[in-house]
Image: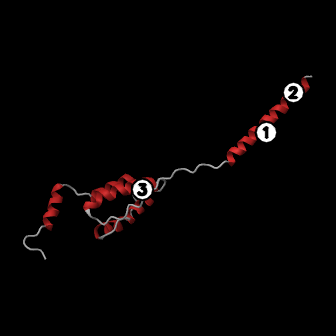
Amino acid sequence: MDLQLLLQQLTQRQIVLQNYIIALVNAQAAPVALAYKKVVTNPGTYNGSPAKFHKWWSKIKIWIQVSMQWATNAEVAAAIYSQLTGPKAGCWAQVHLNHCMVVAHDLTTEIEGFFLPRNNREWAHAQLLWLRQGPQQ
C-alpha cells in the first residue's frame, strides 16, 4: 500500500515538473521586448569660434555620454579631436591627437582651458583688436 502511494506521488510530481518545464520553454520562446535606445544626433564640428564653444561643448559631452558609454579614453579623445576643425581648433587637435589622455577629466580640463575665454579682460582685448575707425571697405 505504501509503495503504491509513493508511486502515485512520484507520478504527480513528474507531471508537475513536466508542466513547469513546458511553461519555461514557452516563456523563453515568447518575443522579447526590445530595449529602448537613446538617439543623440551628431554634435557637428567646432571651428574654434569662442561664441559657439559652449553650445558645441554641451552637445559633445551629451553625445559622448550616450554614444560612447563603454569606449576607452583613447577612443573618446579621438572622437572629440575628430570634431575639431578650422585653423585654431584643427591645429590644436592635430598636435594633441598623439597624446593619449589617461583620464577623461584631464581631457575636459585641457579643452575647456584652451577654448573657453580666459576672462573678461581677454575678451575685451580681442574685441578692441577688431574695432576700426572710419569707413570700412
Say whether marks 2 and 1 touch (CB < 8 Å): no
Q: Mark 3 or mark 2, which has the lower sequence index? A: 2
Q: Give the image quarter of residue 50.
A: bottom left
Q: Quadrant of residue 87?
A: bottom left
> Which label belongs to residue 83?
none
Residue 11, x across and y down, in percent: 85, 33
To which residue does mark 2 refer? Answer: 6
**Along the viewing direction, whichever of 33 and 120 lies nearer the viewer:** 33
Amino acid carrying mark 2 in the image: Leu
Q: Residue furthest left?
A: 134
Going by the image, does 28 lie left or right of 1? left
Residue behind mark 1: 18
Q: Is residue 47 left or right of residue 122?
A: right
Q: Secondary structure at mark 3?
A: helix
Name the residue located 10 percent from the left edge and 70 percent from the top edge.
132
Q: x, y percentage for residue 51? A: 25, 60
Q: Circle 3: is it few (<14), some (14-19), or many (20+) Cα within 10 Å?
A: some
